[in-house]
Amino acid sequence: MPLQDPRPSGIRSAGRPVTIDPDAIASLALRLFAEHGYERTSMEDIARGAGIGRKSLYRYFSSKADLIWGGMEPVIAASGLALEVARDAREDSGDLLAGLRAAAVAGVAVIPDLSVSRGRLRLIAEHPELASRSYESLAPQRERARRHLIGLGVPEETAGYLSAAYLAATFEAWMRWAAGTDPDPVPYLLAAVEVLRVPGA
Amino acid sequence: MPLQDPRPSGIRSAGRPVTIDPDAIASLALRLFAEHGYERTSMEDIARGAGIGRKSLYRYFSSKADLIWGGMEPVIAASGLALEVARDAREDSGDLLAGLRAAAVAGVAVIPDLSVSRGRLRLIAEHPELASRSYESLAPQRERARRHLIGLGVPEETAGYLSAAYLAATFEAWMRWAAGTDPDPVPYLLAAVEVLRVPGA
DNA sequence: CTTCATAATGACACAGGGTGTCATAAGGTG
DNA sequence: CACCTTATGACACCCTGTGTCATTATGAAG
């Protein structure tokens, strides 16, 4: 399997070492998009700008949208991790949504530079093609939220609706934060979760 | 403007009459998709099957996804109309979500054949590419829901989160209904709205 | 019936996204 | 130095989506 994990980040023993820095390329792409527009910037342009071939570009980013969404992955991952942690500390069984709240907020902490994320999200907001990708990019997150809720005793159907609504609302919160100039996205995220309720309780 | 409204449905006075039946083509496409798979069926295949050119096909369906989502438009439109109606009958100000509930259910009534819609939705569910299009296809609906809520006195930010969550939950409801065999989608839709709350009240 | 205006139709060409194949290059390891 | 592993990119595809433009079919006007 020659092309399995483009970014192994593990130790290697032999073979030609990597010369391409994915982060640098994503950063370059973000700049080009901001400069010339998203759809007017072709993958060819980005590859040329990075001094590599188009195929090599596709090895690191499986799609054009991935150049943008890839940067959000740490946030999503951290948010997912928070749900696992919340399971252990669910002794305060009063609020079934506490876990979701914590998960939504947890993503914020791992963002190194909020202004870069804001740029990314603004780009996403401007292009429905990119925004709609939230459905795919956040699918694992939705599944985690669903399982979390089921683990808390929420009926399966309800958990499905809640997790879908949760992701849509928090995504909207990120969009609203990105559209403005407030430094802290947390209040937006908390307000978004306020819109949810667990029918049983 | 030669290509403005592909399906005027109004009266025309002169010119070559239409010989293509969009509904028949959408139906054919649905059959081909079910038979050979969505991505393995090219627009070329569909055009050939319909006995027309690929370009003519694009005149009636602006994208491949539109072949599927186009059939959901009556549902979306009816749902939107229900929100307008709900505004007039909002004397029962006890339940701010009554309008959304009515709108969600209103779409069901205009579906001529539920089994066809189920087929469409199953196809959508199986292909993330199609499912993610819900974001774009339902955008006008989200905007209408947002305005509706604002008209009811809900704060703007809350209305944004609520409408996003509302659409995601009801879309999930349609997906769950489509995945099963129950004849009536209404209970699913009502259960989905149960997941929402208006923070103020 | 002839002519004209109108609108549908599709042939052609093109840009761009995404994929597979495969020869080559580059650098560590022995 | 020889070898071996792996990154790299050149090449060739297919498909979606769009623009242009000549052609065709039809109803309406004369």
Image: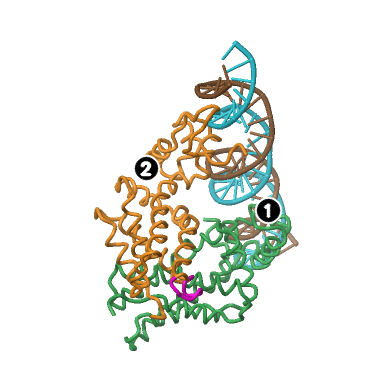
Chain colours: A orange, B green, C brown, D cyan
Residue B126 shown left or right of residue A85 in the figure? right
What chain does mark 1 sit on?
Answer: B
Query: Magenta segment, which residues?
Result: A152-160
Separation (CA) of disc 1 from disc 2? 35 Å
Instruction: Give the class, few, some or many, for how many residues have Cα within 10 Å of label 2's Cα (few <14, many ≥20).
Output: some
Instruction: Determine which quarter of the picture holds residue B199.
Output: bottom left
Asked whether A130 or A37 is in front, the reply is A130
Q: Which residue is mark 1?
A: B40
- In terms of secondary structure, where does tag 1 sit? loop
Name the amino acid, label 1. Answer: Arg
Along the line of sight, which residue is nearer the eye, A63 or A6? Answer: A6
User: Which residue has dot 2 on it?
Assistant: A34
- Mark 2: which secondary structure? helix
Q: Is residue A156 magenta?
A: yes
Quarter of the image where the N terminus of chain A is located: top right
Q: Is residue A56 above or below residue B74?
A: above
Residue B137 location (% of width, % of height): 49, 64
Residue in view at x 49 percent, y 80 percent: B105
- The residue at the point 47 percent across, 47 percent down is A65
Disc 1 versus disc 2: nearer the observer: 1
Image position of B9 (left or right of A112): right
